[in-house]
Image (cartoon, rainbow, N blue to C red):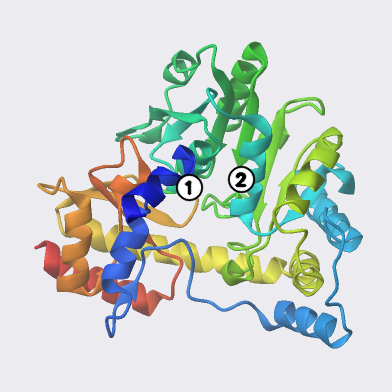
């Protein structure tokens, strides 16, 4: 049997899962000496010692056995404490479910809510894994391109409403947004929720970058500010960003307790739960990590200022200063093929950026730069990019 026959025997959803346009560029430049990697969504700080030490203590205590599918009670209670403090109202531990990464949280949410023939309305440009997760489930992502103007990136709520059809089951909202930095106002979230209520739709809310805001607030506006207990909202979250734990692969879902048995089953049949020692580390992050989170945010704000100032000085780029998350999404005058441009900047500037074409409709002419890094690296990266773009 030849390779074509083998591939044709696979399910269409698996066979047509898209290759990552980001990984394509990463693979081109991964091994280059001296390259400054600003292409993926992580900073350069390792996980803090107090988090890693909690995992080490758990391993030393022999906590290496199967565990609770929904997460150990201590972590679910820590999540409830953290969210209750951050959003100023009480949340029960029964709302929280520990997953093997934010990506698994998203996949479980999608698997619960959509399947073949269903549609998910998705503002774009968007993290490419949203559309991929929807497609693998057999459903269809319906893009609603946002617009860039002098006021920044904006989501046209009438256009969002116009994308809803009888096949729509879910609206997926990422705020603060990867890659644009768009951060919905409380009023916009209330309007989106009203739209979902009117059509009987679920919302998948990705508020992973909710702590990374730069207006002095402790966190971004959230659906939690406007929702009622019975609203159809599933939150996907991760430990990766706030606490520099990208390699730990652990996240969580927040959902109505009535969904608990379904979520537990989906975890059971995927990973059978997250390792206890990893969960102990997560408890430490939640209970003792506020100082580190504040440090990360201050560092990212300084990084944002460096890259915005430096790239604006080239006279060749267009962008909106991001209100949230830790990415600059910018276009370069006269450059339409951003995959080719990203490859060229690896070769000529030794800087790794993500091509905007990876982020779907509306992102094709842009590049994404992650500024969650030390100032020295960002200053050097901007200097290299400026020389290459001139």
Is 301 rendered above or below residue 323?
below
Along the line of sight, which residue is nearer the eye, 113 or 353?
113
Q: Position of residue 343 (x, y in %)?
A: 20, 63
Picture layout, residue 13 above or below residue 169: below
The residue pinned by badge 1 equals: 129
Q: Which residue is mark 2?
A: 106
Position of 301 relative to 207 (above/below)? below
Q: Please identify the quarter of the rendering in which residue 306 is found.
A: bottom left
CA distance separating discs 1 and 2: 9 Å
- Percent across and percent down for residue 192 are 58, 23
Where disc 2 sits, the SS reads: helix
Examine the rendering and report whether any part of residue 323 can be seen.
Answer: no
Are the two marked residues, 1 and 2, in contact with CB atoms closer than 8 angstroms?
A: yes
| Relative to 143, 4 lies left or right | left
| Label 1 or label 2, whichever comes before in sequence order | 2
365 with respect to 113 (left or right): left
Please name the residue shown 49% across and 41% down the image.
Answer: 11
Task: Classify 10 Å Cα crowding around label 1: few (below 14), some (14-19), many (20 and above).
Answer: some
| Residue 134 screen position, x and y as percent | 52, 37
Quarter holding the N terminus is bottom left
Q: Residue at position x 66%, y 31% from top? A: 113
| Residue 328 seen anywhere in this rendered image of the structure | yes
Query: What residue lies at 39% left-to-right and 43% top-to-bottom?
Result: 8
């Amino acid at each position: 049997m030849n390779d074509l026959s083998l591939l044709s025997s696979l399910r269409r959803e698996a066979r047509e899962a898209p290759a990552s346009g980001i990984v394509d560029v990463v693979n081109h430049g991964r091994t280059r000496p001296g390259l400054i990697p600003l292409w993926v969504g992580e900073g350069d700080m390792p996980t803090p010692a107090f988090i890693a030490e909690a995992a080490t203590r758990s391993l030393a205590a022999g906590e290496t056995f199967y565990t609770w599918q929904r997460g150990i009670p201590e972590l679910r209670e820590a999540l409830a404490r953290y969210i209750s403090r951050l959003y100023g109202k009480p949340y029960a531990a029964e709302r929280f479910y520990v997953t093997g990464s934010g990506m698994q949280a998203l996949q479980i949410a999608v698997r619960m809510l959509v399947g073949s023939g269903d549609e998910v309305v998705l503002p774009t440009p968007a993290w490419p894994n949203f559309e991929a997760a929807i497609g693998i489930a057999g459903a269809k992502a319906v893009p609603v391109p946002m617009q860039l103007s002098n006021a920044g990136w904006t989501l046209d709520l009438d256009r969002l409403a116009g994308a809803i059809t009888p096949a729509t089951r879910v609206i997926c909202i990422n705020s603060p947004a990867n890659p644009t930095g768009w951060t919905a106002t409380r009023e916009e979230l209330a309007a989106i929720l009203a739209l979902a209520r009117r059509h009987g739709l679920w919302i998948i809310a990705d508020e992973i970058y909710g702590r990374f805001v730069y207006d002095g607030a402790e966190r971004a506006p959230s659906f939690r500010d406007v929702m009622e207990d019975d609203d159809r909202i599933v939150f996907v979250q991760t430990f990766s960003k706030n606490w520099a734990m990208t390699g730990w692969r652990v996240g969580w879902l927040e959902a109505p307790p009535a969904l608990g048995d379904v979520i537990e089953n989906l975890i059971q049949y995927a990973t059978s739960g997250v390792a206890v020692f990893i969960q102990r580390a997560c408890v430490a992050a939640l209970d003792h990590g506020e100082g580190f989170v504040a440090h990360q945010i201050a560092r990212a704000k300084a990084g944002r200022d460096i890259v915005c100032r430096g790239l604006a000085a080239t006279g060749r780029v267009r962008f909106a200063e991001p209100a949230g998350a830790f990415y600059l999404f910018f276009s370069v005058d006269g450059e339409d093929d951003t995959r080719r441009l990203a490859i060229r900047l690896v070769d000529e500037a030794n800087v790794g950026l993500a091509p905007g074409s990876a982020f779907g409709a509306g992102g094709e002419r842009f590049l994404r730069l992650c500024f969650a890094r030390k100032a020295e690296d960002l200053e050097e990266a901007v200097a290299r990019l400026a020389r290459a773009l001139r």
